[in-house]
Image: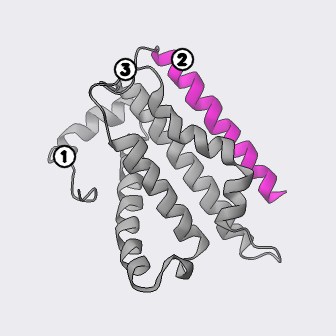
Amino acid sequence: MNWTISTSNYERQLDPYFNQYDPQFSYLRTKFKEILQEEADLNEIVQLVGSDSLSEDQKLTLEIAKIIREDFLQQDAFSQYDYMCPLFKTVGMMKAIVTYYDQAKKAIVESSSRDVKLNWSTILNQTKPLFMRLTRFKFESPKKSRQEFNQEFDAYCEEVCAAFRNFND
C-alpha cells in the first residue's frame, strides 16, 4: 500500500471541523504526510546504496514512519483496542509521535554544531522506554475517557521534552 497517496478527498471540507476540535490537527496530519513521503524517498536511496549512507535524522525518519504505518494507521477491527478509535485518542497519538520526532530531530540537528554529535542509535538507547510507549499507545482501550487520554498524552509529551532537555544540557 502506498501510504503517501492513501488520503481523504475531503480534507479541505473537513479541516474546519478538525481544527475546531484541535487547532494542531492540520499541522499534525501534514507532518505525518511529510514523514511518510520522506520515508518513500529514503527507501529508494536505501535500495540503491544501503542504509549506512543515511544521515542520523533520516534514520530517525524511517523509524518514526514505521510507527506511523504499523502502530497508527494499521487497524485490526477484531481487536479489543483497535475496533474503533475516538478522535481524542487519534489526536493524542499524533501529538505524541510528532513530539518525539520533533524533539529527537532537534537534538540531532543541534548536536551537529558541537564536538560530540548525537546519533539516532544513542538517542534511541537513552529514550528506549519513551520510544516503546509510542508503539504501545495503540493498545490503549478506546473506552477510556477523553480526560484520561488527554492526561496520558500530555504527561507523555512532557516526559519526552524533559528527556530531550537532558541531551542539550
Please tell me whether mark 3 sits on a helix, a strand or a loop: loop
Residue 25 placement (x, y as % from top left): 39, 40
Q: Is residue 150 above or below residue 130?
A: above
Residue 133 placement (x, y as % from top left): 58, 38
| Callout 3 amino acid | Gln
Mark 3 touches mark 2? (CB < 8 Å): no
Question: Which badge, 3 or 2, is on the more N-terminal residue?
Answer: 3
User: Which residue in the protein does label 3 denote?
Assistant: 80
Q: CA distance from mark 1 to mark 3?
A: 26 Å
Left or right: 88 in relation to 8: right
Residue 152 lies in the magenta stretch: yes
Quarter of the view holding residue 42: bottom left
Q: CA distance from mark 3 to mark 2?
A: 18 Å
User: Which residue in the protein does label 1 denote?
Assistant: 8
Q: Is residue 49 above or below residue 145?
A: below
For the point 42% across and 37% down, the residue is 23
For the point 18% across and 41% down, the residue is 13
Left or right: 104 in relation to 43: right
For the point 44% across and 41% down, the residue is 24
Residue 148 lies in the magenta stretch: yes
| Callout 1 amino acid | Ser
Which residue lies most toward the front here?
Answer: 78
Mark 1 touches mark 2? (CB < 8 Å): no
Residue range in magenta is: 145-169
Count how many numbered circles sit on residues in the image: 3
Quadrant containing the N terminus is: bottom left
User: Which residue in the protein does label 2 denote?
Assistant: 148
Which residue lies most toward the left here?
Answer: 9
Q: Nearer the viewer, residue 92 or 45?
A: 45
Quadrant containing the C terminus is: bottom right
